[in-house]
Image (cartoon, rainbow, N blue to C red):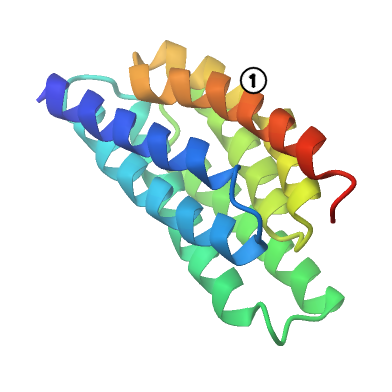
Amino acid sequence: MEIAAQVFGILAFIVSVVSFQLKTYRQILWAQTLCALLFVTHFYLLTCCGQADAVTGAALNGVCAVRDVVLLITEKKRTQKLTTILAIGFSVIVVAIGIATWSSPVSLLFIVAMVLNTVALSIPDPNMVRVFIMISAPFACAYDILNHSIGGTVNEVVSFLSAMTAYIRYRHNE
């Protein structure tokens, strides 16, 4: 079970890194949706292996997959007001489900990371998405280390570097 958990984490890591090299908001969101679903499976399997705090990771990645689909569906008709409402609404859901699945203060690290991630993906500016990902990565990385998530830990380090590289690469082109 542990090996299967780590395989799903590594697959999620690969999708995540690729997502930050994509050029459009829609492409990033589609890739992030797939990534979140892979991480749901990863953290669920880690929970089955005895990592009690990993349940928060599974649950919040599930919320993030739903969030990403809603953002994709509403992209064309989204106003600034709707964007703000969605960001606040999903942030509240992340906090509520994070508290509901709370196992120890370790869960707080992932709650903070996912709120920052929610704000990031609610902004239809790829470079702002990358900035917020760079801010959220250290929180998620600490959570992953404490939950023995190899794919998650590597994902956060490499995603941070990937987002930073793409930020530098695209900052003058967007």
- In the picture, the quarter occupied by the C terminus is bottom right
Residue at numbered disc 1: 138
- In the picture, the quarter occupied by the N terminus is top left
**Left or right of 67 on screen, residue 79:** right
Q: Using the image as rendered, state which of residue 110 and residue 8 is in the foreground.
A: 8
Under mark 1, the amino acid is Pro
Q: Residue at x 62, y 30 (%)?
A: 162
Q: In x, y percent, where is residue 134?
A: 71, 30
Q: Residue at x 71, y 87 (%)?
A: 77
Q: In x, y percent, where is residue 94?
A: 56, 50
The residue tagged with tag 1: helix, strand or loop? helix
**Left or right of 148 on screen, residue 41:** left
Q: Residue at x 75, y 63 (%)?
A: 124
Q: Residue furthest left?
A: 1
Res 48 → quadrant? top left
Q: In x, y percent, where is residue 143?
A: 50, 20
Q: Residue furthest bottom?
A: 77
Q: Residues within 10 Å of mark 1 (few under 14, many from 20)?
A: some
**Left or right of 113 on screen, residue 5:** left
Q: Residue at x 85, y 74 (%)?
A: 80
- Kindly tell me whether residue 114 is visible in this rendering: yes
